[in-house]
Structure formats: C-alpha cells, structure tokens
Image (tube, helix red, strand yellow):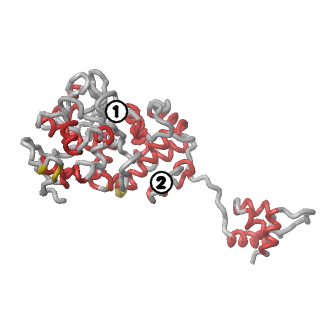
C-alpha cells in the first residue's frame, strides 16, 4: 500500500488528523509520535491504540527498531507524510553503517534495549542532551541518542544524560505530558545538569557520529568503512568490559590515565554493554577512546603492559577487519611453525655444517613443528620403543 492510499479499519476510512507535524532533523520515530499525540491533545498510548489496534503493542514494541509497515502507513496517512520519511526515523537509518542489519527481536548490536511501559521505572535506554533540548526548535529526542556508543553530544561536547536531573527517573516520553518533561515529576529535562567531556573523548565521539552518518571514517590517518570501524570499536569495548584480561587492561588504563579500574556495574548474565547505564558506558568509551588515540601505537603499548596479546584481542570476533589484523600483528605471541620444506632445508644445512641434524637443533632453528622435525631429524640412537610421532613418520614414509 502506498503512503497516499487510505488505509481502512473497522470504523471505515481514516481521515488525516486535524494536527500534523513533520519529523524533525535526526528525530526518532517514538519522539515524533509523542509530539504528534501532544498536538492532538491525546496520550501517546491512545494514538497508538488507534494506529496499532491494541494497547498491548505499546508495552512490547520498540518503535524505533522495526515498526510494522501497516502501522507506518496508517501514521503516515494520518499525519500527511510518507512512509519513507517515518522509516528514516527508525534505527534502519544507521543499521547498514554500524551493524549491517538489526534483528527484529532479541539483542541488537549498538541499540540500547527498551520496553515502552505505562508504569514502573523501566530501563535507562533513552539518552538526551539538555543543551540540545533547550535550544529553540530542539525539544525532541534524537535517534542517535539511542545508540550505546553515544555518550557525548557531538554538537555541544557535553556528557549525555539518561535520567531526570530532579528525581532520577528514566525518560519515558510515551507517558509524560510533554516529550521533554519527566513523566514522574514533570521537570523539564532541558534543566538537567551536565558536564563538559574530555577533549579527546569529544573528538572520538564526533568521529563515530560522522562515521554513522556518512558510512565511512578514519582510524588514525587511514580511511576505513564505517562497518569495520564499528566492529573494531566494539571489540575494544568488549576487551575493557569483560574477558580474561579485562581487569589487567583496566588497571593499566587507571595507572596511565586515572580511569576507574573497577568492574562495570553488574548486568544480566552475559548481557552486553548496551545494558549498562550512561555513567558506566561513559567510562567504558573513554577507555576505548584512549586505546584508539594515535592508532595503533597507543593500543600496542597499553595491551603490552596488560599482557593482552593477539589471541585475547580477537576472541569471539566473528570476522577480523584487515586494519585490525594488521594493527594487532605486533601483539602476536604464537610460536612460528615452519613448513616441511623449511625444516628439510634446515636439516640439510645442519648435516653440512655439524654432521647431523638432531631434533634439538632443528627445534632451535624451526620452532614447534614437531611432525616435520621428526620426519627430517637424524636418528642418533636407537630407541627400544618408537614414539607416537616416529610411528606416524614410519607409516607415512620418510621426507622427500
């Protein structure tokens, strides 16, 4: 169905609503719905009940994630806008640049989880910048604030907030009288206190913001696609957040930069860092910014001091971007395994220079290539019992 067709419901054709408002620059769909409901002088839940046909969808659906197409069509017709415009206010705007795709259900990379409920505290999943909300025409929630790596406002360089500055309640603009008003105490969220972020962190956050918007960014002086950039950023965050060497890495960061080395606030079992509150993610991505400064030299030094070598740096990483692979190469402590031809050449050289190619001398020259060493070494004494490797050599035949 096109955005200009009239969707039908049980009551008959739907007419455009008497109040209509455009989606503002960078606004999230949930924020637009809340502002639209305010202009119609109804609660957002009432508007959604009409659009979805049930009130229960409000408690189950993350409207900034994957709202059903039929709902977008009904909202688009009622507000005299297009479905494409409303889709641009969902996480689909950033999905290709930061994660490839966002699943319809379950945990999603970079997207903070939320549940739109009408009562109770809920999660602190909606962030905001008080200075942005206080600007003329800026009283709406930006979609970018839903992303877990966003901890600093790229425009004002101040720390974002995820709760009311008056009563510490989470942001729930679906049950408040105004999209910028606290649902619990009514305080204007624009009046919440904030603080200027560290210059290095501001620069790093702006790089991530522009990479999410443009689809490419920089690692040091080298241009890189946004998807591998966010894969590397996420892996560094995971290394600081949780893992066998995370404590050592946090300790090194604390010693050099004064970052709190304590474990991050407990979350659900094996829950990713998207579940952390803003204060903890601010500390986490300040650490990531330090690791990515003067890339890759700073990471080498910090990981060496923490004894975090290549095998730890790539753990649980499904695909390793080439730029990250090259950056962590100096951290590789894997013993070199010589090829069969290299061991055979070393054995011939030992026979010419020393008269025999013993196992110990071949191992000194070629490293841990046990089967190739046994195939090419000279038997200097006859053993009463063949070893497992010598038996294997006898079955496969001597080296050519």
Q: Position of residue 190 (x, y in %)?
A: 20, 29
Disc marking residue 124: 1
Q: Residue furthest right?
A: 384
How far apart are the alpha carbons under marks 1 and 2?
35 Å
Q: Position of residue 211 (x, y in %)?
A: 31, 51
Q: Is residue 159 visible?
A: no
> Is residue 295 positioned above or below 394 on the image?
above
- Asked where in the image residue 323 lies, by quadrant, the reply is bottom left
Q: Is residue 338 left or right of residue 183?
A: right
Identify the image quadrant of the C terminus: bottom right
| Residue wearing tag 2 | 327
What residue is drawn where x is 6% and y is 42%? 18
Disc marking residue 166: none
What residue is drawn where x is 11% and y is 43%? 21
Local packing at callout 1 (Cα closer than 10 Å; few below 14, some 14-19, many 20+) is many
> Is residue 313 positioned above or below 196 on the image?
below
Q: Which of labels 1 and 2 is toward the front?
A: 1
Q: Residue furthest bottom?
A: 400
Where disc 1 sits, the SS reads loop
Q: Position of residue 182 (x, y in %)?
A: 24, 27
Judging depth in this view, the residue of 101 and 33 nearest the camera is: 33
Where disc 2 sits, the SS reads helix
């Amino acid at each position: 169905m096109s955005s200009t067709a009239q969707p039908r419901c049980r009551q008959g054709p739907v007419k455009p609503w008497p109040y209509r408002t455009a989606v503002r620059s960078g606004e999230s769909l949930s924020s637009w719905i809340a502002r639209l409901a305010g202009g119609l002088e109804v609660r957002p839940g009432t508007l959604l009940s009409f659009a979805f046909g049930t009130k229960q969808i409000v408690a189950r659906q993350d409207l900034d994630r994957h709202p059903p197409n039929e709902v977008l069509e009904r909202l688009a017709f009622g507000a005299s806008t297009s479905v494409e415009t409303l889709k641009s206010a969902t996480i689909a705007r950033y999905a290709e640049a930061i994660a490839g795709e966002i699943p319809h259900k379950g945990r999603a990379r970079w997207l903070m989880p939320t549940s739109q409920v009408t009562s109770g505290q809920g999660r602190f999943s909606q962030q905001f910048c008080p200075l942005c909300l206080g600007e003329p025409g800026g009283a709406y929630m930006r979609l970018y604030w839903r992303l877990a790596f966003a901890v600093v406002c790229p425009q004002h360089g101040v720390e974002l907030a995820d709760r009311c500055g008056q009563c510490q309640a989470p942001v729930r603009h679906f049950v408040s009288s105004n999209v910028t008003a606290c649902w619990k105490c009514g305080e204007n969220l624009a009046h919440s206190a904030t603080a200027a972020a560290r210059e290095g962190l501001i620069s790093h956050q702006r790089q991530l913001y522009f990479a999410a918007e443009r689809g490419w960014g920089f690692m040091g002086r080298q241009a890189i696609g946004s998807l591998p950039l966010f894969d590397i950023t996420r892996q560094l965050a995971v290394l600081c957040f949780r893992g066998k060497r995370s404590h050592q890495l946090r300790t090194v960061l604390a010693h050099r930069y004064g970052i709190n080395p304590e474990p991050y606030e407990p979350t659900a079992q094996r829950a990713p860092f998207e579940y952390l509150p803003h204060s903890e993610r601010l500390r986490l991505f300040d650490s990531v910014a330090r690791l990515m400064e003067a890339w890759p030299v700073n990471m080498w030094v910090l990981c060496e001091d923490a004894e975090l070598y290549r095998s730890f740096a790539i753990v649980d990483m499904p695909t390793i971007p080439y730029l990250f692979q090259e950056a962590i190469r100096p951290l590789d402590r894997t013993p070199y395994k010589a090829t069969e031809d290299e061991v055979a050449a070393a054995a011939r050289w030992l026979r010419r220079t020393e008269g025999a190619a013993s196992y110990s001398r071949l191992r000194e020259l070629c490293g841990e290539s046990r089967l190739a060493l046994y195939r090419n070494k000279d038997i200097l004494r006859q053993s009463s019992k063949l070893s497992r490797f010598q038996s294997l050599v006898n079955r496969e035949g001597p080296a050519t």
